[in-house]
């Protein structure tokens, strides 16, 4: 059954391997009959800093408004980004800081420590690249960036299930290995 999918490239350089992954995912998902919207954060002019926290609203730039509307529209979200210093790049974190605000992504309950998850009913898939071998990232570093994405951002807002796929090490990967990873991306795009 066709889905409405929003793909967000969280690498600032659209010509990176992450950019190739995002483009391949979009083409494969469209070929499978899904309706897809793609956003390359590096090409969107926005301030990634939430200047006043939650005390004062910061006007969204037109590009961020379009991303917000596409997240609201989507049944499935796909985030493609590298793991830098154990987590996502600043541009992707800045998008979350600016968009996933009370009233859109969640809502604190009056007089309670609990909250309402306003983005429920959506699933997500994070596709990450790294220069660290994924097994080392999992066993030694205990996947801090993956936990941040899954638990403290997406599931906090009600998005689940959240699948995470990691490719690495990318830095010295052969063309054949990269092609194999793109085939995996194609399978995910059809199945997601």
Image: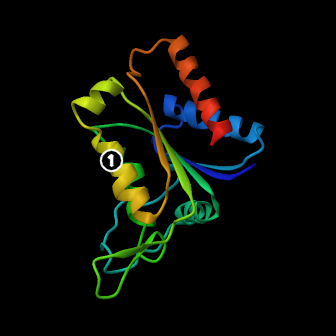
Look at the picture and state if 82 lies above or below 98.
above
Q: Residue furthest left?
A: 140
Q: Nearer the viewer, residue 21 or 108?
A: 108
Image check: 6 left or right of 109? right
Q: Position of residue 174 (x, y in %)?
A: 48, 11
Residue 170 position (above or below residue 7): above
Q: Quarter of the image containing the C terminus?
A: top right
Q: Is residue 1 above or below residue 29?
A: below
User: Is residue 5 visible in this depiction of the protein?
Assistant: yes
Q: Position of residue 28 (x, y in %)?
A: 70, 35
Residue at (64, 63) in percent of width and height: 73
To which quarter of the image does residue 179 belong?
Answer: top right
Which residue is at the front of the view, 167 or 121? Answer: 121
The residue at the point 33 percent across, 76 percent down is 114
Residue 173, quarter of picture: top left
Residue 68 percent location from the top left of the image: 55, 64
Residue 131 visible from this viewpoint: no
* Residue with the mark numbered 1: 147
Pick the residue in front: 83 or 147.
Answer: 147
- Dot 1 crowding, Cα within 10 Å, few <14, some 14–19, many 20+: some
The secondary structure type at the circle numbered 1 is: helix
Residue at position x 60%, y 35% in the image: 188
């Amino acid at each position: 059954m066709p889905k409405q999918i929003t793909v967000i490239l969280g690498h600032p350089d659209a010509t990176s391997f992450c950019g190739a992954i995002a483009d391949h995912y979009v083409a494969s998902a469209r070929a499978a009959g899904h309706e897809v919207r793609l956003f390359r954060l590096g090409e969107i002019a926005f301030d990634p800093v939430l200047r006043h926290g939650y005390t004062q609203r910061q006007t969204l730039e037109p590009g961020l408004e379009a991303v917000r509307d596409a997240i609201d529209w989507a049944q499935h979200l796909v985030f493609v980004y590298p793991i830098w210093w154990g987590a996502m790049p600043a541009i992707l974190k800045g998008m979350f800081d600016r968009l996933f605000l009370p009233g859109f992504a969640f809502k604190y309950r009056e007089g309670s420590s609990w909250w309402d998850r306003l983005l429920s009913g959506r699933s997500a898939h994070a596709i990450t690249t790294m220069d660290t071998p994924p097994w080392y990232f999992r066993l030694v570093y205990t996947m801090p960036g993956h936990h941040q994405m899954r638990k403290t951002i997406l599931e906090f807002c009600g998005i689940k299930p959240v699948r995470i796929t990691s490719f690495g090490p990318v830095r010295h990967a052969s063309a054949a290995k990269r092609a194999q990873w793109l085939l995996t991306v194609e399978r995910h795009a059809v199945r997601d």
